[in-house]
């Protein structure tokens, strides 16, 4: 009588069909985790660029709202802040103007810039940031 094979024995698995699957599993899981990590980093970069542009727009609006400055100086301040932080290409479309908000004189600054999708390369003018500041004056009242 022949000895019973491992297949016939209850509770014992034959792992011959799984041989070589560990390297493939490692590559697939490693690729998935790498892509997930890169996606999180890209999201963080996009949020960083948005925050830098927003902060620069607010700074430019408040600078332009000073009593002894011009609106163009606010635009220049915004461009300078963006250029120092993320680069010159993100500061191409900056505009500012005087307006009235709730009956008060204000300065509005608008920045339209690139939304980074892959690294700093992205969709042009997809990100639009507005900032407002109350305008100062030497008049009393």
Image: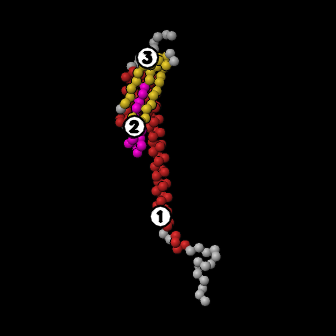
Residue 69 in sight: yes
- Which residues are drawn in magenta? 109-124
Q: Which of the labelled discs sits on residue 114, or is there none? A: 2
Q: Is residue 130 magenta?
A: no
Mark 3 and mark 2: Cα distance apart in space: 32 Å
Q: Residue at x 47, y 22 (%)?
A: 133
* Image spot of residue 10 (x, y percent): 64, 76
Q: Residue at x 41, y 17 (%)?
A: 68
Residue on which the image places disc 1: 24
Q: Which of the labelled discs sits on residue 67, or is there none? A: 3
Label whose residue precedes the other's in the sequence (3 or 2): 3
Which is more foreground, mark 1 or mark 3? 1
Mark 1 and mark 3: Cα distance apart in space: 67 Å
Q: Main secondary structure of the magenta part?
A: strand
Which secondary structure lies at badge 1? helix
Marks 3 and 2 in Cβ contact (< 8 Å) = no
Quarter of image, res 129: top left
């Amino acid at each position: 009588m022949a000895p019973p094979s491992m297949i016939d024995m209850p509770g014992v698995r034959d792992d011959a069909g799984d041989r070589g699957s560990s390297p493939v599993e490692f590559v697939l899981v490693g690729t998935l985790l790498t892509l997930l990590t890169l996606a999180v980093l890209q999201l963080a970069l996009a949020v960083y660029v948005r925050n830098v542009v927003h902060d620069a727009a607010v700074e430019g609006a408040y600078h332009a709202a000073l009593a002894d400055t011009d609106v163009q100086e606010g635009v220049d301040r915004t461009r300078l802040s963006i250029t120092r932080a993320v680069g010159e290409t993100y500061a191409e479309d900056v505009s500012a103007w005087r307006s009235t908000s709730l009956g008060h004189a204000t300065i509005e600054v608008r920045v339209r810039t690139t939304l980074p999708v892959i690294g700093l390369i992205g969709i042009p003018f997809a990100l639009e940031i507005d900032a407002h500041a109350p305008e100062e004056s030497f008049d009393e009242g």
